[in-house]
Amino acid sequence: MKTHWQPSKDWLEQICNFENKIGYSFKNKKYLIEALTHSTYSYEHSMYGLECNERLEFLGDLVLGLTVGNHLFKTFPTYPEGKLSKLKAALVCEPTLAIVAHNWELDKVLLLGKGEETSGGRNKPSSLADATEAVLGAVFCDADFVAAATVILRALEPLIQEAVAGNLVYDYKSALLEKIQTKYHSSQLRFVLLDETGPAHSPSFKMGIYLVNDLLATAIGSSKKEAEQIAAKQALQLLDMKKCI
């Protein structure tokens, strides 16, 4: 028999502040709680039957992509497909979503397991970006697509201008792939999983980036995606390319 989960009074107060930050008040708080529940918290508190935010993250990713793509398509009617794709990549990537999360103060309400908490999980870009997408999925479930789109476009508005101005560093992996293809005329860039450690609920991945057979960079992250991004950033710095224009 599952025990009923009771949030602390302080957390509930922070939730009210969070809803004010995102500009949306949930009718069914169940969706919001799920969106803020990291897999490590769900695992360590399995007696409560709390769902982690991974399914809502999946849904939110779809909402995010369509919302941003549609907004850019309508806002910049003269931009070619390539430029729209670059802008979209800059706005839906992990670093940008982590900025949104910090602006929302999402880190204050994220529910983390003890191990993840002590390892600095509250400030991990991957966890913050995933939770941001999960919140969008939660708004979609609680209301509709329009409500979710309104929430994310409000948050992204200043960042869209930064992206248009070329000041927003985006998806390092895509930036590296493009630079290798255009500057070095090579498509032989490989992202290789070198090692995977840690328990199933809190794994650690080591990724390596190879150009032909030369190792450019390695990095460790809490997800393959995070490790790839960190390694790609290091590779860009190695090539004296810190920004993708």
Image (spheres, grey):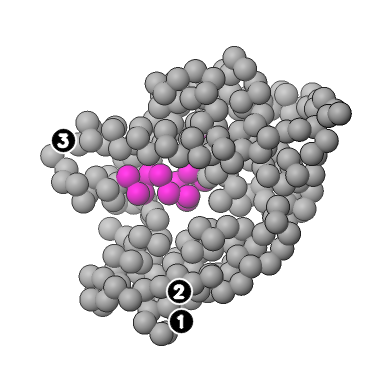
Q: Earlier in the sequence, mark 3 or mark 1?
A: 3
- The residue range painted magenta reads 88-104
Estimate the x, y position of residue 201 in percent, counting from the top left. Answer: 70, 52
Name the residue tied to disc 1. 215
Which of the 4 image quadrants contains residue 105? top right
Residue 244, above or below 137: below
Q: Nearer the viewer, mark 3 or mark 2?
A: 2
Name the residue tied to disc 2. 209
Main SS of residues in magenta: helix
Residue 242, above or below 31: below
Q: Earlier in the sequence, mark 2 or mark 1?
A: 2
Q: Given the current orientation, which residue lies at the most extreme left position?
A: 78
Q: Residue at x 19, y 47 (%)?
A: 81
Residue 126, above or below 228: above
Observer-nearest of 144 and 91: 144
Q: Residue 94 magenta-drawn?
A: yes
Helix, strand or loop under label 2: strand
Q: Residue at x 23, y 32 (%)?
A: 75
Q: Residues within 10 Å of mark 3 (few under 14, many from 20)?
A: few
Q: Residue at x 67, y 51 (%)?
A: 121
Q: Quadrant of the C terminus?
A: bottom left
Contact, CB < 8 Å: mark 3 with mark 2? no
Residue 30, above or below 244: above
Name the residue tied to disc 3. 77
Estimate the x, y position of residue 215 in percent, counting from the top left. Answer: 46, 81
Q: Quadrant of the N terminus?
A: top right
Horizontal relation, residue 129 to residue 78: left or right: right
Which amino acid does the dot numbered 2 rest on?
Ile
Residue 157 seen in render: no
Helix, strand or loop under label 1: strand
Q: Nearer the viewer, mark 3 or mark 1?
A: 1
Contact, CB < 8 Å: mark 2 with mark 1? yes
